[in-house]
Amino acid sequence: MLKKVLIANRGEIAVRVIRACRDLGIGSVAVYAEEDRNSLHVQLADERICIGAGPARNSYLNQDQIITAALNTGADAIHPGYGFLSENSAFARRCAEFGLVFIGPTPEVIDRMGNKSQARKTMMAAGVPVIPGTREPVYDAGAAKKAAAEIGYPVMIKASSGGGGKGMRQAMSEDELAYQFELAQRESANAFGDDTMYLERLIESPRHVEVQIMADSFGHVVALGDRDCSVQRNHQKLIEESPSPAVDDETRKRMCESAVLAAKTVGYTNAGTIEFIVDGNGDFYFMEMNTRIQVEHGVTELVTGVDLVEEQLRVASGLPLGFTQEDVALRGHAIECRINAEIPEKNFMPSPGKVTVLHLPGGNGVRVDTALYTGYIVPSDFDSMIAKILVHAPDREAAIRKMRAALNETLIIGVETNLDFQFRIMHNRIFCEGRADTGFIEQYVRGGK
């Protein structure tokens, strides 16, 4: 088993990893930007070390500082959490060069699945259902027009190195393709330093459903059910639930089998997620693979009883998975609401500041993942998510009622949040009937019912 793990992240995910380390008797090291000196993850870790100040590029993205911190504290592994360096193959390689275990897949797999265009080709070859689109990279608008004519409009333009909704644009006809392609390509170049693009047929009013997998170095790959992540804004998820209300048991079985096939095809190890698009007919298509733990991993933990972060640490220690596919059974229904320090009425403008009053919900089947405490100063340099409220109940209707109660009980004063916005969604007819697709928030914000 690993002896000491440095967590190259901040906020609730850093707290989550520290607690998992503690449960397994593993030492923990927190790194922090100067602005996070008083953060909860810094206070909870066994050791702590400052790695810079200001924006993430000077701290949580500073590979030299993080590796130096790991070596100076005697850590034998680095857990990257999600975001920041979690899907950076160069960082994973540097960890290996310095004898540090990177808690995630190999750099080669990160490269293979991180490039969305290459990932599509790999899945096509493996027989995993893929949205019709280009097989080769697209670099200019002329080639994009030719490809779109073959695929058929409308099309989705995507960055090969994309993520978080960046470098994505829709083109409904040839008249707007060149303009939208160039916008997406510029955004990709600015965000990822890569102008490689690809095109897919646009699936209108889709559901976003993903499958959680865990894999060890002994060739065991297990699917842990599905999550519905359709409620999102600008491709950023707001609500996740498991199991998906849009998927029947037979489709769920086939999706999980496809996810396992995808992971085995690339020789995957550790935690990962296969993301699918589900159309109005219930057909599903591979969209991408996230080669890391997900923000929404908690809903899977609630319905399966598997501690995914502990399994990550076990696999990184060279141990086999602690369960088999036959052990996995989905029990009840789980929902997660992301609580952000933002103002929905002002186009979701971030709302940094000091938390002066805090009360978090509790009770049977309620879980809160957060790094908040009274007096904590929410910084302006980092992501606005400040908490995740999760509930678990015997069925979806009961889970919605429990989430309503949990949101109603939550009190955060000092910063504006999206608590009321989430509360209203929990009463929205379309959501409650399980019919929300990826366009739901846009329609809801405009007053749709």
Image: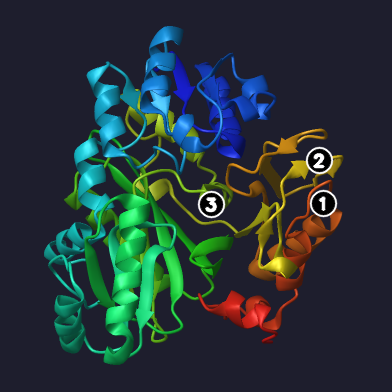
| Mark 3 secondary-structure assignment | loop
* Disc with the residue nearer the chain's start (3 vs 2): 3
- Under tag 1, what secondary structure? loop
Disc 3: which residue: 296
Comparing labels 1 and 2, the label whose residue is closer to the camera: 2
Q: Who's the residue at 32% across and 39% down the image?
A: 88
Front-most of 119 and 194? 194
- Comparing marks 3 and 2, which lies closer to the viewer? 2
Q: Secondary structure at mark 2?
A: loop
Specify which label sits upstream in the sequence, 1 or 3: 3
Residue at left 23%, top 56%? Answer: 261
Residue 208 is tagged as: none
Q: Is residue 322 above or below residue 42?
A: below
Side of 387 relative to 84 (left or right)? right
Residue with the mark numbered 1: 410
> How much space separates mark 3 and mark 2, taking CA atoms?
24 Å
Q: How many marks?
A: 3
Q: Nearer the viewer, residue 367 or 275?
A: 275
Q: Quadrant of residue 152?
A: bottom left
Task: Give the residue displayed 37% in from the left and 74% down from the top.
Answer: 169
Q: Position of residue 367 (x, y in %)?
A: 69, 45
- Snapshot quadrant of residue 64: top left
Quadrant that contains the N terminus: top left
Q: 130 above or below 224?
A: below
Q: CA distance from mark 1 to mark 2?
A: 13 Å
- Amino acid found under the numbered disc labelled 3: Glu
Q: Residue 227's x, y, as percent?
A: 49, 61
